[in-house]
Amino acid sequence: MSRVLCTLKDLDVTGAKEIVLERDGGRFPVFVVRFADQIMGYVNSCPHARLPLNWREDAFFDVTGTFLFCTSHGAQFDPVTGNCIRGPCKGQRLIPFAIRIDGETIISEQDA
């Protein structure tokens, strides 16, 4: 079932936006990220310990703004592929969350 997640403008300040969806009666956190003119969606869960990447609202990038960063373990992820390039889960990847762009709106392409 498609659902509006956020708008492109929501990504202007931090480059990413967390959205907490409902799934099977529980919380299902995902995030949308803009990097190098591409928009991707991921499940907000580090493959190392299944903790959220961000420690504060919509803060997913490292200080350089180049990599997605797990604040619990220091893992760094390529924002376009979701591949872990440094840290305890090197070689693993973030779980993609299918999205589509409709004008200025970002919409989920999969059930939460």
Image (cartoon, rainbow, N blue to C red):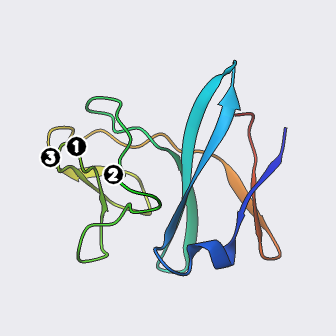
Secondary element at image label 3: loop
Residue behind mark 3: 87
Residue behind mark 2: 55
Q: Quadrant of residue 48?
A: top left
Pair 2/3: label in front: 2
Please state, as top left, top right, bottom left or bottom right, where the N terminus lies in the image: top right
- How many C-alpha atoms fall within 10 Å of the one at disc 1: few (<14), some, or many (≥20)? some
| Residue 41 in the image: above or below residue 80 | above
Kindly check if marks 1 and 2 are in contact, taking CB atoms under 8 A apart as contact. yes
Q: Nearer the viewer, residue 26 or 39?
A: 26
Secondary element at image label 2: loop
Q: Residue at x 34, y 66 (%)?
A: 61
Pair 3/1: label in front: 1
Please state, as top left, top right, bottom left or bottom right, where the C terminus lies in the image: top right
Q: Looking at the picture, how far across and down is residue 70, in whole percent?
A: 27, 49
Please state if 26 lies on the left or on the right of 111 as rendered.
Answer: left
Residue behind mark 1: 72
